[in-house]
Structures are given as structure tokens and as C-alpha cells.
Image (cartoon, rainbow, N blue to C red):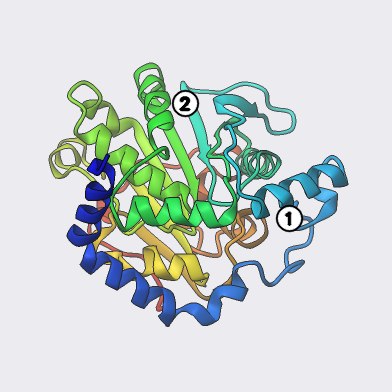
Amino acid sequence: MLHRPRQWLRRLVDNRSAIRRDLRLSLTHAADIPRMVLPLGREPGVRSEMAWSSYSSRGEALFSLLQLLVPATRESISQGTLVCHPPRTTHEGRSSRWFFINGMGTAGPVALLNASEIARIFRRPVHLIHTPTWGLIRDVAESITARTLRKDGKLSRPALNILVEALENNDQVVLVCHSQGTIVASYIVRKLLRHPSARQLVKKLEIYCIGGVADSLEIDPQLTLAAGHPVPYVEHFANGRDYLAQIGILSHLDSTAGTVYCLADRPGHLLNEHYLPAIARGDFCQRHSRLYGYVRGREPGLKGALSVVKKGMEPHG
């Protein structure tokens, strides 16, 4: 009966330095909390998460808002089974597969909206791995538990087997993750690199983290040396005034592998509204990132080894 409380007490004690660190970061950047959803309407033509017109009905939009506000246990609408196809393209080429893992507070209609916009911009089918919202407060608690207390819980377990199967059956697997999804990705990578049969497959994996909340993401030095490029290949995109990116990737550059692209004075955390248009224009990377190389259905060149040692990031204040 006392086993579970003792486990939690041990986690609190073992991770007390991480708890102090995250409390300090949360308070230091608290002034930027309102900028997570602001500004709105700055990107014309975007299917914004905050616009009624982005949804099939106002009822669907209201349903998504209620899920965010009302705590409840909910099921995922897709564990890689729903595929969002771009206009005029219905197949996947060159034996590749794209996946998207959403962030916290994301109801099913919002996750589909995000995945559809990724499919449209990159002109590739995108398989949705939906982490359902259990209400924003509970989602934040799950993220703290996973990141600060190092307890995976429900986050990465469903996605791991999906990624292993995709790596076994495709030449290339691309994982785009947003917000809390970057925590999921960090656990997936850690497990893949420790998986005896899947470890060698990680050289096929590319991960693109947007508005990342994770405090670490590793690559494998031996596999990287053998492949001649980072394994897995990783890039990060962060708005410098995005509160969650500030307490996430931008405060943990030393423990996070991959090139980091940052627009220092840009606010906002919403994927469609605040990130995807700038990524599609190449604003973050002066059109040099590998992810930008995929825009409008293009194919980028070879994976570069530069990302192993260089953080391509502007000052973020």
C-alpha cells in the first residue's frame, strides 16, 4: 500500500536539483506566458488553431476548447493510423514515412489541423500519433513528471512500437514533434538506442523538434561516426519569446543534440500560427536547414555532420 508513495518520494529526492532548476526557469520567464498564444493573425492564409474558420464547424472548435479546460481521461484518435494527405498527393515516395506527435492541450481536431498543415507545407502524407489532452492542468503535470521526475508514464510507449515498425519497413522515417511531443521524442530516441535489434535502424530516423519543451535529446556517437552524419539526425526550431521553448530547448543547449535555429524576438507557441509559416519561408535558418529542404515536396541533400558540433542559433536574450 505504501509502495507507490515511497516511489514518488524517492523520485522527488533523486530529482530535487531538476525540480529547483525547473522552478527557477518557470519563474524567470513567466512574463512571456501570455505570448504563448499571441500575437494572432500575423500570418495571413494560415489555418490557425485559434480561428473558428479552421475547423469544420464551430461545434468542433468548441469541443476542442472544452477538452483543454475540462480534466478527463481521453483516448487517442490515432496511433499512426490516421494519415493526412496534402492536396493532389495521395502516396508516399521513395520508401519514406512521416509522423507527427502533437503537444500538450491538443484535442483530436487540433492535432488533425496541425498534421494537415504539415502535410500541405511539405507535400507529403503525414501519419498522426495523437497524444490526447487530459485537460491542460493534467497535461502540464504529465510533462513535469516525464521531464523533471524522469517518469515516462503514458507518453512514449504507444509511439515506440509504431516507430520501430516504420524503421523496419522504410528507408527513411521523419518525425516532426511539437511542444510536449519533443519530450515523447526524447524518450523514444533513448529507448531505440538501447534496443538491441532497433539500434542500427536509428540511422534512418530524422527528428524535427518545434517549440521544444524537452531538456535533453541524445545522439549515438558510434553510430554517428559510422554513418558520417548525426544518428538520429536532429534539428530544433524555437521562437525566442516562446515561454515553453525558453524553459525547454533554449535553456538546455548543452544537453540537447542537433542544430538549434532560433528567431530571437519572435513570440508564440502555436504550431500553425507561430511556427510553420516561418519554417516554410526559411526564416529560422536562412533556408539552410534540412527541414526547409523538404518544403513544397523537395528533397534535401545529404545529411551534414555539422549538426553534431554546431548550434546554429541566434542570441535569444
- 189 left or right of 250? left
Name the quarter where the C terminus is drawn: bottom left
Q: Residue furthest left?
A: 222
Q: CA distance from mark 2 to mark 1?
A: 28 Å
The residue under label 2 is 96
Compared with 55, 85 (above or below) is above
Q: Residue 188: x and y, percent?
A: 33, 38
Residue sitting nearer the eye, 16 or 180: 16
Which of the numbered marks, if any, corresponds to residue 26? none
Q: Quadrant of residue 296?
A: top right
Please tell me which residue is depicted at 23% across the width and 54% down the height of the picture.
Answer: 11
Residue sitting nearer the eye, 67 or 54: 67
Q: Which amino acid, by three-letter code, is at mark 2?
A: Ser
Q: Which amino acid, by three-letter code, is at mark 1?
A: Ser
Q: Is residue 101 visible?
A: yes
Which of the numbered marks, if any, corresponds to residue 48? 1
Name the quarter where the N terminus is drawn: top left
Compared with 99, 38 (above or below) is below
Q: Residue 301: x and y, percent?
A: 41, 42
How many C-alpha atoms fall within 10 Å of the one at disc 2: few (<14), some, or many (≥20)? some
Please tell me which residue is depicted at 32% across the width and 54% down the height of the picture.
Answer: 258
Q: Residue 138: x and y, percent?
A: 52, 52
Residue sitting nearer the eye, 183 or 72: 72
Compared with 262, 298 (above or below) is above
Disc nearer the start of the sequence (2/1): 1
Compared with 143, 38 (above or below) is below
Please tell me which residue is depicted at 39% across the width and 57% down the height of the picture.
Answer: 144
Question: SS at mark 1?
Answer: loop
